[in-house]
Amino acid sequence: TPHPQRPRLGSIALASGAAWVLAGNDTGTMVTASPRLYPHMWSWDSAFIMVGLAQLDVDRACREMETLLSGQWEDGMIPHIVFSDEDGYFPGPDRWQTAVVCEHAPARPHTSGICQPPVHAIALRKIVDAGRRRSGADRRRAEALLRSTWPRLFAWQRWLATYRDPLGTGLIAVTHGWESGMDNSPRWDSPYAAVQPGDDLPPYVRQDLDKVCEADERPTDEEYDRYLWLIEEMRRVGYRADEVVRIGSFLVGDVFLTALFALSCDVLADLGEESGQDPEKIAQLRRWAARSRTAVLDTRDPETGLARDYDMRAHKWIAAPTIAGFAPLLSGGLAPQDQAALLATLEGPDWMGHPDLVAATPPTVSPSSPQFMPKQYWRGPQWPVISWLFSWAMRRNGLHDTAARIREETLRLVSDGTFAEYYHPLTGAPLGSRSQSWTAAVVLDWLY
Ligand code: 9WN
């Protein structure tokens, strides 16, 4: 192998290391996204964390869901951050001021005012399955969580369908790059280029840079000005969902989030059928799933077959060579020959099969592209959690071989035991935060 110097832990050491990471980041009510860089609960992180916790302790996984939903807004939105009482992350509650300016936001816990990808139905699925595999108290706890949580997750999917489908096609829009979870992906370069921070952007001090090894693993100051400006725009309209979509400088149909929306609608509909929920709501979820699945397929570039985001402000397609191009493999519905072609692209020499990769797992940007930056956050590194998501959805869609390969290769990548946020695809070096909870969580799921 080209990198024999990389340390490697066996499965048992790796699983116990992962359990230690989750225990170490647990405040009692929430497992923070990471110890220093992210001392709060992030929406989509928490879902993956629940997937890991479900393998260790069903009751603890249920409590994580309850903590997340204690921050749900009255209109149904699950906010992208539920804040702990820790300091050390900017922007914090003082900057967001959601409870001050928005009637839908809870007074406590403090929350941010934007959302993140809807992967929570997957977490509920995992908790219910873990509870059912065990017996007695665990099973009852998980079934009770299913009953209490299902209507809340339905309201969350409905919020996205109601406020975030401005074209009415099922292509779900984000109003901030943070909502996509892939903050500085090249996907957002052109829409961000059109965002002009106002002279009246209140001053601020970043707190993230001293918590990673090197500043160039994180977004730039110019990017941060735009991130903060969009929040300022939203704060000024009281985070009203319709107003944000109407006035915000950033409005992009996010094909990756749309695929996850479709997938989650179906997963939630399945759980609804199993637990006797309102048939009309279940049918509604199936309709949303079908419409958004089609919307994902309709974004495909006729030449490459890759799915694309759509800039709803500039009225143009965004063709960046990123992992989001493979969104149809998450939401399904491809014709057999199209599915085979997209899989061949993913496994081919521009992506997982690129000869310089240490581990054959999907990088966030194609290493063959001039935009590829191997150390920079969402501009090239491999993110174990994204690999898990593809692997899980592919198994669900019957793509077992690729799913198994991604699992095996990602486990090899993370066997250094640092549980890093992301990894350098050409050296395997850990990057960003260490002891990142969602990395540990997905490793646990894979090893159980
Ligand atoms: C902003 C917590 C989050 C992840 C995102 C990742 C990063 C935050 C940041 O960390 O975003 O939300 O400060 O960079 O991009 O996907 O949920 O792990």
Image (cartoon, grey):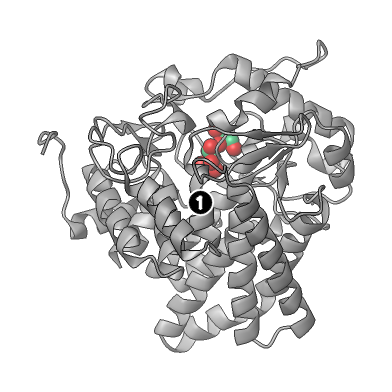
- Quadrant of ligand 1: it is top right
> From where the camera sits, is residue 1 visible?
yes
Residue 408 against residue 176 in the figure, above or below: below
Residue density around tag 1, few if under 14, some if 14–19, many if 20 or more, within 10 Å: some
Q: Residue 69, image x and y in percent? A: 67, 60
Q: Residue at x 77, y 58 (%)?
A: 161
Q: Residue at x 74, y 21 (%)?
A: 195
- Ligand 1 near label 1 (Cβ, under 8 Å)? no
Quarter holding the C terminus is bottom left
Q: Residue 274, image x and y in percent? A: 60, 86
Residue 336 against residue 87 in the figure, above or below: below
Q: Residue at x 25, y 42 (%)?
A: 359
- Name the residue type under label 1: Thr
- Residue identifier under label 1: 27
Q: Residue 227, image x and y in percent? A: 67, 26
Q: Secondary structure at mark 1?
A: loop
How many dots with numbers? 1
